[in-house]
Image (cartoon, grey):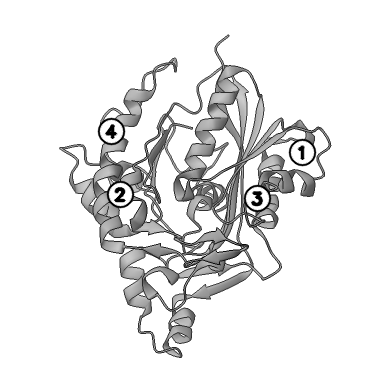
Amino acid sequence: MTLYSKIIGTGSYLPEKRVTNQELTEQLAAKGIETSDEWIFSRSGISARHYAEPEQKSSDLAVHAARQALDMAGLQPDDIDLIIVASSTPDFFGSFPSTACIVQRKLGMSNHCAAVDVQAVCSGFVYAVATADSFIKSGAHKKVLVIGAEVFSRILNFDDRGTCVLFGDGAGAIVLGASGEPGILATKLHADGRHADILSVPGNVSGGAVAGSAFLYMDGPAVFKLAVSVLEKVAHEAPGARRHARRPARLADPAPGQHPHHEQHRQETRPAAGKNGGHGRPARQHLGRLDPAGARHRRARRPHQEGRQRDDGRRRRRLHLGRRPGEDVMACFYSAGLGADVRAGM
């Protein structure tokens, strides 16, 4: 029997501390930095963001989301045979032990399942899903817990209004299970290291200390320009990548305007959707809503949004992800590196 992977549970978690645009504007104004609620919202769709408490780590947020996903799937932690955590803000400096291992411990697991971290910034969750999908299709694993978790507030420079208004903390999780029917239809992964310098945390470890800046840096205009082109391109590639599913793709005329956009800016998907070559889609099919979660928590954003679609009643029955019966879902991401990744179908 041909094996496929299917989403059988989702979960999400946001820290309690919520900071609105107005509150952040006032905090920045006290430092002489000018911005406004209108400026932030018109460029990003963000009206608020959540910040973790000083004692909270990525693994703490991840465990909250994981428990929700396990509960929805009707599973116990020890039913999982692989944990993959996507995070750019791991619990430990140097990234070991892995945050996935810490999550395993905090979930009270005793089955010694495999656990590994994936790091591809905001594309990381899709890389993690693609990895889990491959493990399941190979028969190596049957139930995989995939988590995206970030505490990006720890690496924000609050003197840089171009970045500090855009990011927040949070976690999202899914459980992928082996199935005889297609669930994850296709993935298409790319990376282009030539653009590594336009979005990065440029510091590095030297002699037990950080050499260079430990804050996130982003060349906004360069990121915007590249994102418009790569999101459109990869959105057209993904349906062609699905070779093994039994039923034909239902994304016959794909365009980014049809799909949930990357969490970066509203403005990035508008031009991409406009370059659709006649493949336009109504706004109903563009699940780009950032609220009520607010700012980007990078790779955690996509799974959190899936969980939020469930919680606010958009999904009447199992995992409709805001879509009508018979429709598939495509998610496009790009990140530092830059990687442009797609997951089509749930």
Give amino acid for label 3. Answer: Ala
- Which residue bears the numbered disc 4? 236
**197 relative to 29, above or below:** above
> Quick one: label 1 or label 3, which is nearer the N terminus?
3
Neighbor class of circle 3 (other Cα within 10 Å; few <14, some 14-19, many 20+) is many
- Evaluate whether residue 320 shows in this view: no
Distance between mark 4 and mark 1 Cα atoms: 37 Å
> Quick one: label 2 or label 4, which is nearer the N terminus?
4
- Which residue bears the numbered disc 1? 77
Neighbor class of circle 1 (other Cα within 10 Å; few <14, some 14-19, many 20+) is some
Is the Cβ of the residue at disc 2 closer than 8 Å to that at disc 1? no
- Which residue bears the numbered disc 3? 65
Is the Cβ of the residue at disc 4 closer than 8 Å to that at disc 3? no
Which mark's residue is nearer the viewer, 2 or 4? Answer: 4
Which mark's residue is nearer the viewer, 3 or 2? Answer: 3
Which x, y percent locates residue 59?
Answer: 68, 53
- Which residue bears the numbered disc 2? 283
Distance between mark 2 and mark 4 Cα atoms: 18 Å
Give amino acid for label 1. Answer: Pro
